[in-house]
Amino acid sequence: MKEHSRRDFLRDLGVGTGFVVLVPTVVSCASRAAAPVAAAGAPPADLAAPPLTRPDDRDAVAFNWERGNAGAVPESYRDDINGPDGPNGHLGKHLPYVPAGEGVPDTPAGFVALMWGNPDLGHVRHPNSPRGTEGYEEGHWYDWIRVRKAVDGEAAEAESTYSDWPASGEGDSGRYAVLGGGDMSGDGGRNAIYLAALPGDVASGDMVRIHAHCRYHGEYVDFLEVP
């Protein structure tokens, strides 16, 4: 799909072509649930490997829309990402951001704190649900997050795993925290913070690539700056 198709998609849905996700990037998250996505499908070669660095003209919504339609998002979710609420309610909802301000707990050294669906950008906040939830019997959360320094060439990539929610499973490398403290499951799980491990070559101020997988709705990629 060519670049003009991305612009046409956003224009037709009422989103300006200059709509860019900027952050300080891996409940009812859909109008219907699909089976958990063990693998994100098989996008074509030019989309299968996420870019190593953040392009100057980065448009995270358009990129993930194109990649999602190419196979990174399950077929059962594509009507949603292509619908009128696709940019903010489904694609934007799956894009990461670093929470800031009152109620954000201290982030352990070697980790970055992530949430999904930045309300400051008009995106719907991403909910989470445990196994046994109606419509999401196998649970709904991000089960892996990969973080890589956004540089050309070779670089280490740290993967954090989350085999359960609202508490980590045995052997998981990822951790959780709660915005504002309290019950992790409150407000539909929207206050959940994912603590994802950083590679050893990443420091404060570095740009990193976040490549993450939602159990029901596939893979998403974005870039952010580590606080």
Image (cartoon, helix red, strand yellow):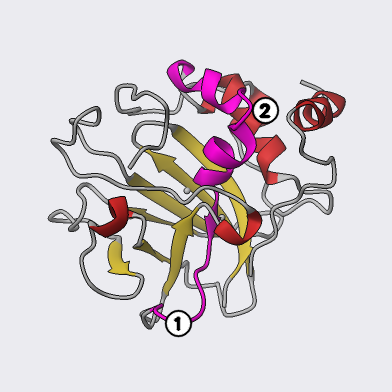
Q: Residue at x 45, y 59 (%)?
A: 115
**Which span of residues is magenta-colored?**
75-104
Taking the image as drawn, is residue 15 in sight? yes
Query: Mark number for residue 102?
Result: 1
33 horizontally vs 87: left or right: left
- Where is residue 127 drawn, in percent x and y? 36, 48
Q: 86 or 148: nearer the eye?
A: 86
* Residue 194 drawn above or below residue 165: below
Instruction: Answer with the quarter of the image where residue 226 lies.
Output: bottom right
CA gap between label 1 and label 2 equals 35 Å
> Judging from the image, what secondary structure is the residue with disc 2 in?
helix
* Residue 189 drawn above or below residue 193: above
Please name the amino acid that badge 1 sits on: Glu
Query: Which callout, 1 or 2, points to the residue nearer the camera?
Result: 1
- Name the residue tied to disc 2: 66
- Where is residue 78 drawn, in percent x and y? 53, 20
Question: Quarter holding the N terminus?
Answer: top right
